[in-house]
Amino acid sequence: MINLGKKHITMNRILEQKIVVIIRTSYIEKIFSIIDSVLEGGLNIIELSMSTKKSLSLLEKIKTKYENKIIFGAGTVLDSETARIAILNGIEFIVTPNTDKKTIELCNKYSIVKAIGALTPTEVINAWEMGADFIKIFPANVFGPDYIKTLKGPYPDLSFIPTGYVDIKNAKSYMQAGAAAVAVGGGIFTEEMVASNDFKAIVKNSKQLVEIMNSL
């Protein structure tokens, strides 16, 4: 059954927190520890990248363990088949690196929040007209925060989520440029941190990013 109320809640939570945490790691046995750390740091909107090893099998485990504790999404979704599996596993939003019409149509059918990848002005408006709720500007690091500001000129009502090398140092600049939220992964935790079990650093970075957003 389509739940329009749930979609509205998910969108509002993303806009309120302004931060989506991308989980992508080769240390899949430590994913729960990573999620626990960002939760302790005050972040609870989690996107599991489908490029992560055994990602599909992890969806149900994460959803079960963190039921009602996180807003859970699937990222790096390349096609509608993957999107459908994720939706059936109870995810609340879909994130793609590119503009795929079939994926957008599927998410529209199930009333699932979607952040659709685009970069050029033409890709941006095409994604929006197909029904994207957010436009994932990827890779954001190619042009930086000024590009978001420039896009907001012709597209003032579109909601952009820059993704790609967003971190504690530049997140504020992206928001001041007009981003609706930012997506971060390596900007708050690295493979080195995870390998050495330095989860305190992940907690610290998460808290710092929350403080930055709260200061806006």
Image (tube, helix red, strand yellow):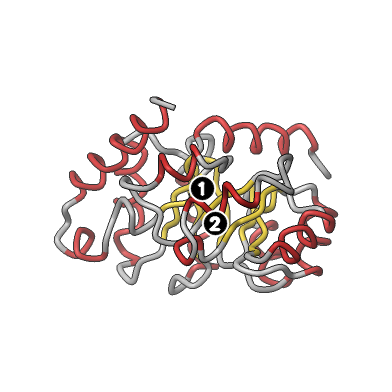
Does 47 appear above or below 68? below
Mark 1 and mark 2 residues within 8 Å of each other at the beta carbon = yes
| 189 displayed left or right of 99 | left
Give SS at disc 1: helix
Q: Quadrant of residue 195?
A: bottom left
Q: Looking at the image, which residue is at 54% across and 56% down?
A: 60
Depth check: 142 or 60 in front?
142
Where residue 100 sits, quadrant-wise, is bottom right
Q: Residue at horizontal 62%, vertical 65%?
A: 119
Count the labels in the image. 2
Of the 4 image quadrants, the one containing the N terminus is top right
Q: What's the residue at 80%, 37% (across, down)? A: 4
Q: Quadrant of the C terminus?
A: top left
- In percent of width and height, residue 9 lies at 67, 32
Frontmost residue, 216 versus 185? 216
As drawn, the label of residue 136 is none
- The spot of residue 111 in percent (x, y) is 79, 47
Residue for badge 2? 60
Measure the C-alpha gap from mark 1 to mark 2: 6 Å
Q: Amino acid at mark 1?
A: Thr
Q: Nearer the viewer, residue 119 or 193?
A: 119
Query: In the figure, is residue 116 to the left or right of 122?
Result: left
- Looking at the rendering, which quadrant does residue 130 occupy? bottom right
Which class describes the residues within 10 Å of circle 2: few (<14), some (14-19), or many (20+)?
some
Residue 180 lies, in percent from the top left, at: 58, 40
Relative image position of residue 101 (x, y in whole percent): 80, 68
Residue 64 circle label: 1
Is the residue marked by circle 1 packed among few (<14), some (14-19), or many (20+) residues within 10 Å?
Answer: few
Residue type of the residue flagged with mark 2? Glu
Badge 2 element? helix
Seen at 72% across and 59% down, the residue is: 124
Above/below status of 32 relative to 57: above
